[in-house]
Image: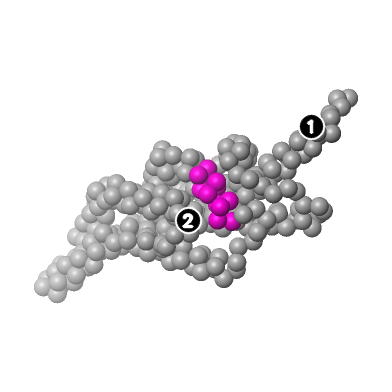
């Protein structure tokens, strides 16, 4: 049996406590982190990601000495998990914004049912394409690095063991939800405008030529037009989305643009 000196035992205990407190916040965020926290990602992979991020974040932050009993430990578990989940939910809202934008675009172009069950969560094909492309873009542009920076910065905003004020957290959450819906509608605006123009033109043609079956003529037009618009607008949509995600990770408590 290996015997450790009291000094070394105390140092190991402090290090384990430090890593545990950081891991609580990191693991809560990783469970909802875009790309790394998807349902299709195995739990073991998410655990490894959380451990690796903990190894990156822990040396850069300061954690108070451990509590003197079980109630104090439970308080740390509650506060750290709450902060991590709050940040993770705010990041997950960006993925939901892409899904909502895809749903709006698909409904506007009559493509809402095509390949609707291809994802873990059923969604229209446009939403699935936008989500996969957005997650790939975020991962390619250093999402893991920004996540580590966000976690380190979060310790300045929310010190370990201190639960955020309920009122402030509620106002911040409502602002993030509002921004997510505004972002999703902004991304889908070209499809909504194209749908309005298409339906107006179809109504004028129907009034001018009542005997013409405009539905047989208009259905292929809106379908191919929607696919063409997706190919043309997707790069700009993803660029705007990635910029909004980067802005949030740089300043998570700043005013929503």
> What label does residue 227 carry, if any?
none
Q: In the structure shown, which secondary structural element does the residue marked by tag 2 occupy?
A: loop
Residue 83 quadrant: bottom right
Which residue sits furthest bottom?
207
Q: Is residue 122 left or right of residue 26?
A: left
Quadrant location, the N terminus? top right
- Is 93 drawn above or below residue 61 in the view shown? below
Quadrant assignment for the C terminus: bottom left
Which residues are the magenta region?
148-158
From the top left corner, tell me how far across and down residue 9 is, in percent: 81, 34
Q: Which mark is residue 8?
A: 1
- The x, y position of residue 170, in whole percent, is 54, 68
Is 157 contained in the magenta span? Answer: yes
- For the point 35% across and 63% down, the residue is 185
- Left or right: 250 with respect to 230? right
Q: Secondary structure at mark 1?
A: helix
The residue located at (51%, 69%) in the rendering is 171
Outermost residue, top side:
1
């Amino acid at each position: 049996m290996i015997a450790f000196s009291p000094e070394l035992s105390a140092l190991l205990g402090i290090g384990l406590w430090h890593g545990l407190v950081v891991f609580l916040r990191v693991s809560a965020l990783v469970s909802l982190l875009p790309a790394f926290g998807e349902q299709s990602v195995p739990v073991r992979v998410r655990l490894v990601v959380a451990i690796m991020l903990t190894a990156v974040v822990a040396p850069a932050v300061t954690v108070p000495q451990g509590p003197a009993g079980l109630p104090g430990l439970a308080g740390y578990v509650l506060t750290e998990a709450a902060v991590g989940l709050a940040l993770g939910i705010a990041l997950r809202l960006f993925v939901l914004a892409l899904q909502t934008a895809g749903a709006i675009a698909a409904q506007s172009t009559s493509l809402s049912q095509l390949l609707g069950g291809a994802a873990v969560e059923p969604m229209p094909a446009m939403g699935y394409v936008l989500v996969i492309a957005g997650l790939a873009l975020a991962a390619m542009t250093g999402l893991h690095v920004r996540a580590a920076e966000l976690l380190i910065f979060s310790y300045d905003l929310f010190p370990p063991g201190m639960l955020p004020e309920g009122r402030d957290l509620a106002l911040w959450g409502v602002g993030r939800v509002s921004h997510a819906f505004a972002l999703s509608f902004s991304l889908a605006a070209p499809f909504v405008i194209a749908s309005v123009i298409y339906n107006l033109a179809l109504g004028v043609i129907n009034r001018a030529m009542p005997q013409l079956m405009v539905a047989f003529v208009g259905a292929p037009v809106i379908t191919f037009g929607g696919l063409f618009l997706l190919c043309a607008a997707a790069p700009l949509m993803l660029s705007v989305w990635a910029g909004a995600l980067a802005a949030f990770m740089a300043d998570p408590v700043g005013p929503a643009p």
